[in-house]
Amino acid sequence: MAKKNKPTLQIEAEKCIGCELCEAECPFDAIHVVDGVAVIDYEKCKVCRKCITVCPTDCLYLEGVEEGEEEKQPEIAVSTEAGEYSGVWVFVEQEDDQVHPVSWELLGRGRALADTLTCELAAMVLGHNVQAAATESGYYGADRAYVIDDPVLQRYRTAPCASGCITLIRKYKPEIVLVGATTLGRDLAGAIATELQTGLTADCTGLDIDQETNLLRQTRPAFGGNIMATILTREDRPQMATVRPRVMEALPRDESRSVATVAEPLGITEDQIATKITGFQPDTDLDAPNLQYAEVICSGGRGLGNPAGFKLIQELADAFGGVMGASRATVDAGWISHDHQVGQTGSTVRPRLYIACGISGAIQHLVGMQTSDIIVAINSDPNASIFNVADYGIVGDLYQVVPELIRLAKERNLKEALLGQTTSG
Ligand SMILES: Cc1cc2nc3c(=O)[nH]c(=O)nc-3n(C[C@H](O)[C@H](O)[C@H](O)COP(=O)(O)OP(=O)(O)OC[C@H]3O[C@@H](n4cnc5c(N)ncnc54)[C@H](O)[C@@H]3O)c2cc1C
Protein backbone atom coordinates (compact mmCIF):
# COMPACT_ATOMS: atom_id res chain seq x y z
CA MET A 1 0.00 0.00 0.00
CA ALA A 2 1.42 3.42 -0.98
CA LYS A 3 2.71 5.46 1.91
CA LYS A 4 0.61 8.50 2.54
CA ASN A 5 2.75 11.69 2.64
CA LYS A 6 1.69 14.83 4.42
CA PRO A 7 0.13 16.88 1.60
CA THR A 8 1.56 20.31 0.76
CA LEU A 9 0.07 23.05 -1.34
CA GLN A 10 1.87 23.73 -4.62
CA ILE A 11 1.49 26.27 -7.39
CA GLU A 12 2.09 26.15 -11.13
CA ALA A 13 3.28 29.76 -11.32
CA GLU A 14 2.97 30.04 -15.10
CA LYS A 15 -0.78 29.33 -14.90
CA CYS A 16 -1.39 31.94 -12.16
CA ILE A 17 -3.15 35.10 -13.36
CA GLY A 18 -2.71 36.98 -10.07
CA CYS A 19 -6.47 37.30 -9.57
CA GLU A 20 -6.11 37.30 -5.75
CA LEU A 21 -9.14 35.06 -5.23
CA CYS A 22 -6.98 32.58 -3.28
CA GLU A 23 -5.61 35.39 -1.14
CA ALA A 24 -9.11 36.58 -0.30
CA GLU A 25 -10.31 33.04 0.48
CA CYS A 26 -7.43 31.88 2.70
CA PRO A 27 -8.53 31.90 6.34
CA PHE A 28 -4.91 31.63 7.55
CA ASP A 29 -3.36 34.57 5.65
CA ALA A 30 -1.07 31.99 4.07
CA ILE A 31 -1.17 33.04 0.42
CA HIS A 32 -0.35 36.41 -1.10
CA VAL A 33 -0.10 37.67 -4.64
CA VAL A 34 3.33 39.16 -5.20
CA ASP A 35 4.21 40.63 -8.61
CA GLY A 36 1.13 39.02 -10.14
CA VAL A 37 1.79 35.48 -8.84
CA ALA A 38 0.43 33.73 -5.75
CA VAL A 39 3.11 32.92 -3.15
CA ILE A 40 2.44 30.36 -0.40
CA ASP A 41 3.58 30.91 3.18
CA TYR A 42 4.19 27.32 4.35
CA GLU A 43 4.51 28.39 7.97
CA LYS A 44 0.90 29.46 7.94
CA CYS A 45 -0.69 27.10 5.39
CA LYS A 46 -2.96 24.49 7.02
CA VAL A 47 -3.71 22.76 3.69
CA CYS A 48 -7.41 23.48 4.08
CA ARG A 49 -7.80 23.54 0.25
CA LYS A 50 -10.05 26.57 0.22
CA CYS A 51 -7.72 28.37 -2.21
CA ILE A 52 -7.88 25.38 -4.58
CA THR A 53 -11.66 25.54 -4.72
CA VAL A 54 -11.70 29.18 -5.84
CA CYS A 55 -8.71 29.18 -8.22
CA PRO A 56 -10.11 29.89 -11.72
CA THR A 57 -7.05 28.52 -13.55
CA ASP A 58 -6.42 25.35 -11.47
CA CYS A 59 -2.86 26.47 -10.78
CA LEU A 60 -3.01 25.38 -7.13
CA TYR A 61 -2.81 21.70 -6.25
CA LEU A 62 -1.80 19.35 -3.46
CA GLU A 63 1.41 17.36 -3.55
CA GLY A 64 2.02 14.28 -1.45
CA VAL A 65 -1.50 12.95 -1.59
CA GLU A 66 -1.96 9.21 -1.97
CA GLU A 67 -2.63 8.11 -5.55
CA GLY A 68 -6.32 8.38 -6.34
CA GLU A 69 -6.93 10.81 -3.51
CA GLU A 70 -6.11 13.90 -5.57
CA GLU A 71 -9.31 13.46 -7.53
CA LYS A 72 -11.33 13.79 -4.35
CA GLN A 73 -13.44 16.90 -4.22
CA PRO A 74 -12.34 19.27 -1.50
CA GLU A 75 -14.39 18.66 1.57
CA ILE A 76 -16.87 21.36 2.18
CA ALA A 77 -17.20 21.85 5.86
CA VAL A 78 -20.74 22.47 6.94
CA SER A 79 -21.13 23.19 10.61
CA THR A 80 -23.16 20.80 12.69
CA GLU A 81 -25.44 23.74 13.32
CA ALA A 82 -26.26 23.96 9.61
CA GLY A 83 -28.56 20.97 9.89
CA GLU A 84 -30.83 22.85 12.25
CA TYR A 85 -31.49 25.51 9.64
CA SER A 86 -34.20 25.16 7.05
CA GLY A 87 -36.22 27.38 4.75
CA VAL A 88 -35.67 30.26 2.35
CA TRP A 89 -36.67 33.70 3.64
CA VAL A 90 -37.13 36.97 1.83
CA PHE A 91 -37.21 40.32 3.60
CA VAL A 92 -40.27 42.24 2.37
CA GLU A 93 -39.28 45.90 2.15
CA GLN A 94 -42.16 48.27 2.60
CA GLU A 95 -42.69 51.89 3.51
CA ASP A 96 -45.98 53.81 3.67
CA ASP A 97 -47.91 50.69 2.62
CA GLN A 98 -45.83 50.44 -0.55
CA VAL A 99 -43.86 47.23 -0.98
CA HIS A 100 -40.68 47.61 -3.00
CA PRO A 101 -41.08 45.35 -6.08
CA VAL A 102 -37.63 43.84 -5.46
CA SER A 103 -39.31 41.88 -2.63
CA TRP A 104 -41.61 40.13 -5.10
CA GLU A 105 -38.69 39.55 -7.47
CA LEU A 106 -36.78 37.86 -4.64
CA LEU A 107 -39.79 35.73 -3.73
CA GLY A 108 -39.84 34.63 -7.39
CA ARG A 109 -36.23 33.42 -7.17
CA GLY A 110 -36.74 32.19 -3.59
CA ARG A 111 -39.60 29.97 -4.78
CA ALA A 112 -37.26 28.14 -7.16
CA LEU A 113 -34.58 27.77 -4.47
CA ALA A 114 -37.08 26.48 -1.90
CA ASP A 115 -38.54 24.01 -4.39
CA THR A 116 -35.04 22.69 -5.13
CA LEU A 117 -34.34 22.29 -1.42
CA THR A 118 -37.89 21.01 -0.80
CA CYS A 119 -38.33 23.48 2.01
CA GLU A 120 -40.64 26.36 2.84
CA LEU A 121 -40.45 29.84 1.30
CA ALA A 122 -41.23 32.55 3.82
CA ALA A 123 -41.60 36.32 3.81
CA MET A 124 -40.24 38.40 6.69
CA VAL A 125 -42.53 41.39 7.07
CA LEU A 126 -41.73 44.13 9.57
CA GLY A 127 -43.51 47.47 9.95
CA HIS A 128 -46.72 48.95 11.26
CA ASN A 129 -50.08 47.80 9.85
CA VAL A 130 -48.39 45.40 7.48
CA GLN A 131 -50.99 42.64 7.24
CA ALA A 132 -51.74 43.59 3.61
CA ALA A 133 -48.06 43.20 2.71
CA ALA A 134 -48.00 39.79 4.41
CA THR A 135 -51.09 38.65 2.47
CA GLU A 136 -49.61 39.99 -0.75
CA SER A 137 -46.39 38.02 -0.16
CA GLY A 138 -48.49 34.86 -0.48
CA TYR A 139 -49.76 36.00 -3.88
CA TYR A 140 -46.12 36.24 -4.98
CA GLY A 141 -45.12 32.77 -3.82
CA ALA A 142 -44.51 32.75 -0.03
CA ASP A 143 -45.86 29.78 1.94
CA ARG A 144 -45.60 31.61 5.26
CA ALA A 145 -45.13 35.16 6.48
CA TYR A 146 -43.32 35.96 9.71
CA VAL A 147 -44.75 39.30 10.80
CA ILE A 148 -43.66 41.83 13.38
CA ASP A 149 -46.22 44.63 13.49
CA ASP A 150 -45.32 47.44 15.86
CA PRO A 151 -45.69 51.26 15.81
CA VAL A 152 -41.95 51.50 16.56
CA LEU A 153 -41.39 50.14 13.03
CA GLN A 154 -43.57 52.79 11.36
CA ARG A 155 -40.51 54.32 9.66
CA TYR A 156 -37.33 52.41 8.94
CA ARG A 157 -34.51 52.66 11.42
CA THR A 158 -31.64 50.19 11.37
CA ALA A 159 -31.65 49.21 15.05
CA PRO A 160 -35.27 48.14 15.64
CA CYS A 161 -35.72 46.59 12.21
CA ALA A 162 -32.47 44.61 12.44
CA SER A 163 -33.32 43.59 16.00
CA GLY A 164 -36.72 42.24 14.89
CA CYS A 165 -35.20 40.33 11.97
CA ILE A 166 -32.47 38.87 14.18
CA THR A 167 -35.04 37.72 16.75
CA LEU A 168 -37.02 35.95 14.01
CA ILE A 169 -33.94 34.39 12.44
CA ARG A 170 -32.60 33.14 15.79
CA LYS A 171 -35.95 31.62 16.67
CA TYR A 172 -36.93 30.03 13.34
CA LYS A 173 -33.47 29.41 11.84
CA PRO A 174 -33.90 29.91 8.09
CA GLU A 175 -31.12 28.47 5.97
CA ILE A 176 -31.14 31.31 3.43
CA VAL A 177 -32.12 34.97 3.83
CA LEU A 178 -32.47 37.23 0.78
CA VAL A 179 -32.71 41.03 0.94
CA GLY A 180 -33.13 43.59 -1.86
CA ALA A 181 -29.97 45.59 -2.59
CA THR A 182 -31.79 48.88 -2.13
CA THR A 183 -30.53 51.69 0.12
CA LEU A 184 -32.63 50.28 2.96
CA GLY A 185 -31.83 46.65 2.21
CA ARG A 186 -28.07 47.19 2.03
CA ASP A 187 -28.16 48.90 5.41
CA LEU A 188 -30.33 46.23 7.01
CA ALA A 189 -28.60 43.14 5.57
CA GLY A 190 -25.18 44.31 6.76
CA ALA A 191 -26.47 44.94 10.27
CA ILE A 192 -28.13 41.50 10.47
CA ALA A 193 -25.13 39.60 9.07
CA THR A 194 -22.74 41.39 11.42
CA GLU A 195 -24.79 40.57 14.50
CA LEU A 196 -25.32 36.94 13.43
CA GLN A 197 -21.66 36.61 12.42
CA THR A 198 -22.58 35.10 9.08
CA GLY A 199 -21.57 35.66 5.47
CA LEU A 200 -23.33 38.16 3.22
CA THR A 201 -22.82 38.35 -0.54
CA ALA A 202 -23.87 41.73 -1.91
CA ASP A 203 -25.35 42.47 -5.33
CA CYS A 204 -25.74 38.90 -6.54
CA THR A 205 -26.68 38.43 -10.17
CA GLY A 206 -27.35 34.71 -9.83
CA LEU A 207 -28.59 32.46 -7.01
CA ASP A 208 -28.67 28.68 -7.31
CA ILE A 209 -28.43 25.59 -5.17
CA ASP A 210 -25.26 23.50 -5.42
CA GLN A 211 -26.42 20.02 -6.35
CA GLU A 212 -23.89 18.17 -4.20
CA THR A 213 -23.87 20.23 -1.04
CA ASN A 214 -27.22 22.04 -1.13
CA LEU A 215 -25.31 25.25 -0.40
CA LEU A 216 -26.47 28.51 -1.93
CA ARG A 217 -24.32 29.44 -4.94
CA GLN A 218 -24.12 33.22 -4.85
CA THR A 219 -22.80 34.61 -8.11
CA ARG A 220 -21.73 38.21 -8.57
CA PRO A 221 -19.30 40.19 -10.72
CA ALA A 222 -15.82 40.57 -9.22
CA PHE A 223 -12.62 42.34 -10.19
CA GLY A 224 -14.32 45.19 -12.00
CA GLY A 225 -16.83 42.86 -13.62
CA ASN A 226 -14.11 40.98 -15.48
CA ILE A 227 -14.98 37.66 -13.83
CA MET A 228 -18.10 36.23 -12.26
CA ALA A 229 -17.31 34.87 -8.79
CA THR A 230 -19.47 32.19 -7.18
CA ILE A 231 -19.39 32.49 -3.41
CA LEU A 232 -20.46 29.88 -0.85
CA THR A 233 -21.18 30.47 2.81
CA ARG A 234 -19.99 27.09 3.97
CA GLU A 235 -20.12 27.18 7.71
CA ASP A 236 -22.24 30.00 9.02
CA ARG A 237 -26.00 30.34 8.94
CA PRO A 238 -28.12 31.75 7.53
CA GLN A 239 -26.56 32.17 4.10
CA MET A 240 -27.34 35.78 3.24
CA ALA A 241 -27.39 37.59 -0.10
CA THR A 242 -28.61 40.90 -1.47
CA VAL A 243 -29.87 41.27 -5.03
CA ARG A 244 -30.47 44.51 -6.90
CA PRO A 245 -33.92 45.40 -8.24
CA ARG A 246 -34.74 44.00 -11.69
CA VAL A 247 -32.14 41.23 -11.57
CA MET A 248 -34.65 38.48 -10.68
CA GLU A 249 -38.14 38.00 -12.04
CA ALA A 250 -41.29 38.02 -9.91
CA LEU A 251 -43.87 35.27 -10.33
CA PRO A 252 -47.23 36.38 -11.73
CA ARG A 253 -49.42 37.65 -8.88
CA ASP A 254 -51.85 34.88 -7.95
CA GLU A 255 -54.67 35.81 -5.59
CA SER A 256 -55.71 32.20 -5.20
CA ARG A 257 -52.59 31.54 -3.15
CA SER A 258 -52.85 31.90 0.61
CA VAL A 259 -50.13 32.42 3.17
CA ALA A 260 -49.86 31.16 6.76
CA THR A 261 -49.01 34.01 9.11
CA VAL A 262 -46.86 33.83 12.23
CA ALA A 263 -46.98 36.98 14.37
CA GLU A 264 -44.17 37.76 16.77
CA PRO A 265 -43.56 40.70 19.10
CA LEU A 266 -40.74 43.16 18.39
CA GLY A 267 -39.37 42.78 21.88
CA ILE A 268 -37.96 46.30 22.22
CA THR A 269 -39.62 49.59 23.01
CA GLU A 270 -39.11 53.14 21.74
CA ASP A 271 -37.13 54.20 24.81
CA GLN A 272 -34.53 51.50 24.04
CA ILE A 273 -33.75 52.95 20.58
CA ALA A 274 -31.05 55.60 20.31
CA THR A 275 -32.14 57.13 16.98
CA LYS A 276 -35.29 59.27 16.95
CA ILE A 277 -37.21 60.43 13.91
CA THR A 278 -37.87 64.14 14.21
CA GLY A 279 -39.36 64.61 10.74
CA PHE A 280 -39.67 62.95 7.37
CA GLN A 281 -39.08 64.52 3.98
CA PRO A 282 -39.77 62.29 0.97
CA ASP A 283 -37.40 62.43 -1.98
CA THR A 284 -39.11 64.81 -4.39
CA ASP A 285 -36.48 64.95 -7.13
CA LEU A 286 -38.97 64.72 -9.97
CA ASP A 287 -36.18 64.97 -12.56
CA ALA A 288 -34.53 61.75 -11.41
CA PRO A 289 -35.32 59.06 -13.98
CA ASN A 290 -37.02 55.90 -12.75
CA LEU A 291 -34.78 53.68 -14.79
CA GLN A 292 -35.27 50.44 -12.91
CA TYR A 293 -38.95 50.08 -13.69
CA ALA A 294 -39.12 51.98 -17.01
CA GLU A 295 -40.82 50.21 -19.91
CA VAL A 296 -38.58 51.87 -22.51
CA ILE A 297 -35.03 53.16 -22.06
CA CYS A 298 -33.04 55.02 -24.72
CA SER A 299 -29.38 55.24 -23.73
CA GLY A 300 -26.51 57.27 -25.09
CA GLY A 301 -22.82 56.44 -25.00
CA ARG A 302 -19.51 58.07 -25.83
CA GLY A 303 -20.42 57.70 -29.51
CA LEU A 304 -22.56 60.81 -29.01
CA GLY A 305 -19.31 62.74 -29.16
CA ASN A 306 -20.42 65.55 -26.88
CA PRO A 307 -22.91 66.30 -24.08
CA ALA A 308 -25.32 68.06 -26.45
CA GLY A 309 -25.93 64.67 -28.07
CA PHE A 310 -28.16 63.76 -25.11
CA LYS A 311 -30.77 66.24 -26.44
CA LEU A 312 -31.24 63.86 -29.34
CA ILE A 313 -31.45 60.87 -26.95
CA GLN A 314 -34.09 62.72 -24.90
CA GLU A 315 -36.08 63.33 -28.11
CA LEU A 316 -35.81 59.64 -28.91
CA ALA A 317 -36.94 58.70 -25.38
CA ASP A 318 -39.90 61.10 -25.65
CA ALA A 319 -40.90 59.66 -29.02
CA PHE A 320 -40.91 56.15 -27.51
CA GLY A 321 -42.51 57.24 -24.23
CA GLY A 322 -39.41 56.18 -22.33
CA VAL A 323 -36.66 57.52 -20.13
CA MET A 324 -33.06 58.38 -20.87
CA GLY A 325 -30.16 56.12 -19.85
CA ALA A 326 -26.41 56.46 -20.31
CA SER A 327 -23.14 54.58 -20.25
CA ARG A 328 -20.61 55.24 -17.52
CA ALA A 329 -18.17 56.80 -19.99
CA THR A 330 -20.60 59.68 -20.53
CA VAL A 331 -21.28 60.01 -16.80
CA ASP A 332 -17.55 60.06 -16.04
CA ALA A 333 -17.11 62.72 -18.74
CA GLY A 334 -19.68 64.89 -16.94
CA TRP A 335 -22.11 64.82 -19.90
CA ILE A 336 -25.03 63.53 -17.81
CA SER A 337 -25.78 62.75 -14.15
CA HIS A 338 -25.14 59.37 -12.53
CA ASP A 339 -28.93 58.87 -12.03
CA HIS A 340 -29.01 57.90 -15.70
CA GLN A 341 -26.19 55.36 -15.63
CA VAL A 342 -27.02 51.79 -16.60
CA GLY A 343 -24.72 48.94 -15.63
CA GLN A 344 -22.71 47.39 -12.89
CA THR A 345 -22.11 50.62 -11.00
CA GLY A 346 -25.36 52.20 -12.16
CA SER A 347 -28.88 50.79 -12.35
CA THR A 348 -29.82 47.27 -13.39
CA VAL A 349 -32.73 47.58 -15.80
CA ARG A 350 -35.11 45.19 -17.49
CA PRO A 351 -37.30 47.30 -19.81
CA ARG A 352 -39.42 45.91 -22.59
CA LEU A 353 -37.36 47.98 -25.04
CA TYR A 354 -33.74 49.17 -24.67
CA ILE A 355 -32.23 51.32 -27.41
CA ALA A 356 -28.43 51.72 -27.13
CA CYS A 357 -26.97 54.57 -29.18
CA GLY A 358 -23.20 54.83 -29.57
CA ILE A 359 -22.52 52.33 -26.76
CA SER A 360 -19.78 49.76 -27.35
CA GLY A 361 -21.21 47.02 -25.09
CA ALA A 362 -18.58 46.66 -22.37
CA ILE A 363 -19.41 43.82 -19.96
CA GLN A 364 -20.06 46.31 -17.14
CA HIS A 365 -22.77 47.93 -19.26
CA LEU A 366 -24.23 44.64 -20.50
CA VAL A 367 -24.71 43.17 -16.99
CA GLY A 368 -27.09 46.03 -16.28
CA MET A 369 -29.33 45.73 -19.36
CA GLN A 370 -28.93 42.43 -21.15
CA THR A 371 -32.14 40.94 -19.75
CA SER A 372 -34.22 43.65 -21.49
CA ASP A 373 -36.94 42.09 -23.66
CA ILE A 374 -35.94 43.77 -26.94
CA ILE A 375 -32.55 45.42 -27.45
CA VAL A 376 -31.91 47.74 -30.39
CA ALA A 377 -28.28 48.83 -30.90
CA ILE A 378 -27.00 51.60 -33.12
CA ASN A 379 -23.25 51.70 -33.62
CA SER A 380 -20.94 52.73 -36.45
CA ASP A 381 -18.63 49.78 -35.69
CA PRO A 382 -20.07 46.50 -37.05
CA ASN A 383 -17.88 44.57 -34.58
CA ALA A 384 -19.12 46.38 -31.47
CA SER A 385 -19.90 43.93 -28.64
CA ILE A 386 -23.33 45.46 -28.11
CA PHE A 387 -24.47 43.66 -31.27
CA ASN A 388 -23.88 40.32 -29.48
CA VAL A 389 -26.85 40.99 -27.20
CA ALA A 390 -28.97 43.04 -29.62
CA ASP A 391 -32.19 41.75 -31.17
CA TYR A 392 -31.90 44.48 -33.83
CA GLY A 393 -28.55 45.98 -34.81
CA ILE A 394 -28.20 49.06 -36.97
CA VAL A 395 -24.68 49.77 -38.24
CA GLY A 396 -24.41 53.47 -38.92
CA ASP A 397 -23.91 56.98 -37.63
CA LEU A 398 -26.34 57.55 -34.79
CA TYR A 399 -26.82 61.15 -35.92
CA GLN A 400 -28.36 59.80 -39.12
CA VAL A 401 -30.17 56.80 -37.66
CA VAL A 402 -31.74 58.31 -34.52
CA PRO A 403 -33.67 61.14 -36.27
CA GLU A 404 -35.10 58.49 -38.60
CA LEU A 405 -36.15 56.33 -35.62
CA ILE A 406 -37.81 59.36 -34.03
CA ARG A 407 -39.72 60.00 -37.24
CA LEU A 408 -40.83 56.35 -37.48
CA ALA A 409 -41.82 56.27 -33.81
CA LYS A 410 -44.05 59.29 -34.31
CA GLU A 411 -45.48 58.47 -37.72
CA ARG A 412 -45.74 54.68 -37.71
CA ASN A 413 -45.85 53.72 -34.04
CA LEU A 414 -42.55 51.87 -34.25
CA LYS A 415 -42.69 51.20 -30.51
CA GLU A 416 -45.76 48.98 -30.79
CA ALA A 417 -44.30 47.25 -33.85
CA LEU A 418 -41.23 46.33 -31.80
CA LEU A 419 -42.99 45.54 -28.54
CA GLY A 420 -45.74 43.58 -30.22
CA GLN A 421 -43.18 40.81 -30.51
CA THR A 422 -42.53 40.55 -26.79
CA THR A 423 -44.60 38.35 -24.57
CA SER A 424 -44.17 40.12 -21.24
CA GLY A 425 -45.97 43.18 -19.92
C1 LIG B 1 -15.50 48.63 -12.08
C2 LIG B 1 -16.12 49.18 -13.33
C3 LIG B 1 -17.47 49.44 -13.32
C4 LIG B 1 -18.08 49.93 -14.46
N1 LIG B 1 -19.42 50.17 -14.45
C5 LIG B 1 -20.02 50.58 -15.58
C6 LIG B 1 -21.44 50.79 -15.63
O1 LIG B 1 -22.14 50.66 -14.63
N2 LIG B 1 -21.99 51.17 -16.80
C7 LIG B 1 -21.25 51.38 -17.95
O2 LIG B 1 -21.83 51.74 -18.98
N3 LIG B 1 -19.93 51.19 -17.93
C8 LIG B 1 -19.28 50.83 -16.78
N4 LIG B 1 -17.94 50.70 -16.77
C9 LIG B 1 -17.17 51.20 -17.93
C10 LIG B 1 -17.13 50.25 -19.10
O3 LIG B 1 -16.05 49.36 -18.95
C11 LIG B 1 -16.93 51.02 -20.42
O4 LIG B 1 -15.76 51.81 -20.32
C12 LIG B 1 -18.09 51.94 -20.77
O5 LIG B 1 -19.31 51.22 -20.71
C13 LIG B 1 -17.90 52.47 -22.20
O6 LIG B 1 -18.91 53.39 -22.49
P1 LIG B 1 -19.34 53.63 -24.00
O7 LIG B 1 -19.80 52.36 -24.60
O8 LIG B 1 -20.28 54.79 -23.99
O9 LIG B 1 -18.00 54.17 -24.66
P2 LIG B 1 -17.03 53.47 -25.68
O10 LIG B 1 -16.58 52.16 -25.20
O11 LIG B 1 -15.99 54.49 -26.01
O12 LIG B 1 -17.93 53.21 -26.97
C14 LIG B 1 -18.42 54.18 -27.82
C15 LIG B 1 -19.07 53.48 -28.99
O13 LIG B 1 -19.69 54.43 -29.83
C16 LIG B 1 -19.50 54.05 -31.18
N5 LIG B 1 -19.62 55.27 -31.99
C17 LIG B 1 -18.75 56.28 -32.09
N6 LIG B 1 -19.27 57.27 -32.85
C18 LIG B 1 -20.50 56.82 -33.26
C19 LIG B 1 -21.53 57.39 -34.08
N7 LIG B 1 -21.42 58.61 -34.60
N8 LIG B 1 -22.63 56.65 -34.29
C20 LIG B 1 -22.78 55.42 -33.74
N9 LIG B 1 -21.83 54.85 -32.94
C21 LIG B 1 -20.72 55.55 -32.71
C22 LIG B 1 -18.14 53.41 -31.20
O14 LIG B 1 -18.03 52.50 -32.30
C23 LIG B 1 -18.09 52.70 -29.85
O15 LIG B 1 -18.54 51.36 -29.98
C24 LIG B 1 -17.31 50.20 -15.64
C25 LIG B 1 -15.95 49.91 -15.63
C26 LIG B 1 -15.37 49.41 -14.49
C27 LIG B 1 -13.90 49.10 -14.52
Image (cartoon, rainbow, N blue to C red):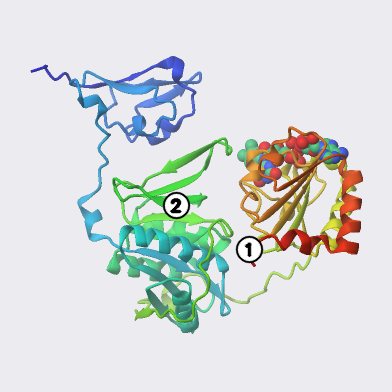
216 to the left or right of 356: left
Can residue 75 be seen in this snapshot?
yes
Q: Which image quadrant for residue 90? A: bottom left
What is the crowding at mark 2: few (fewer than 14 residues within 10 Å), some, or many (at least 20)?
A: many
Inspect the image, locate mark 2, and give the three-letter code of the amino acid beneath it.
Leu
Q: Which residue is mark 2?
A: 207
What is the crowding at mark 1: few (fewer than 14 residues within 10 Å), some, or many (at least 20)?
A: few
Across and down, in percent, residue 153 comes to 48, 77
Give the label on residue 423, or none.
1
Across and down, in percent, residue 425 comes to 64, 67
Q: Nearer the viewer, residue 326 or 369?
A: 369
Mark 2 falls on what kind of element? strand
Question: Residue at 29% of width from left, 64% of height from top?
Answer: 173
Question: Residue at 72% of width from left, 44% of height from top?
Answer: 328
207 to the left or right of 295: left
Alpha carbon of mark 1 to alpha carbon of mark 2: how far? 24 Å
Mark 1 falls on what kind of element? loop
